[in-house]
Image (spheres, rainbow, N blue to C red):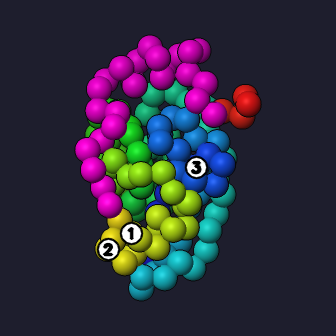
Amino acid sequence: MKIIAIPTINGELSSHFGGSEYFSLFETENGKILNEIILPTPEHNPGAYPKYLADNKVTDVILGGVGQKAIDIFTHHKITVHTGVAVNKTKALVEEFLSNKLVVSDNSCDSDHHEHGEHGGEGHHHGHGRH
């Protein structure tokens, strides 16, 4: 069984990992979706999201953009990272992933400023329910 996580905002992939309202987790087996779980996001501290997803047995994560430190933490927890994915409905992305048709490109957030300052402190308010 694979458990695929997608940071979600308005039912779609959040283009920025730290800007998600919640995580959509899809339990899959033999190329089929068995179950979808909505998981609330924990407090956004550096490294918290990857550890939180690892604690929830996630095997793969589909992302738009994410900082390198988060990728390193995912890798440490043996979670496969698929970055540079275009925004789409979460279920459609998982179906593409399961059929080996998921389009990945360059990570759109490959600089470390996403782990400090702008996205690590009080200035970080991408979609955290403040609309």
From the viewer's side, name the closer residue of 35 and 75.
Answer: 35
Q: Secondary structure at mark 1?
A: helix
Q: Find residue 53 and report its horizontal and vertical position in percent.
A: 49, 50
| Count of numbered labels shown in the rendering | 3
Magenta span covers which residues? 103-127
- Distance (Cα) linking label 3 and label 1: 16 Å
Q: Is residue 42 left or right of residue 108?
A: right
Are dots 1 and 2 in contact, CB under 8 Å?
Answer: yes
> In the figure, is residue 55 to the left or right of 106?
right
State the mark number for residue 97.
1
Give the residue at mark 2: 100
Which residue does the image show at 36% across and 20% down from the upper left? 113
Q: Secondary structure at mark 2?
A: loop
Q: Is residue 73 left or right of residue 128?
A: left
Residue that label 3 marks: 8
- Extreme-left residue of the structure: 106
Whether the magenta-drawn stretch holds residue 17 is answered as no
**Residue 17 locus on image (x, y percent):** 47, 40
User: How far apart are the alpha carbons under marks 1 and 2?
Assistant: 5 Å
Q: Report the magenta stretch's main SS.
A: loop
Is there a contact, CB below 8 Å, between mark 3 and mark 1? no
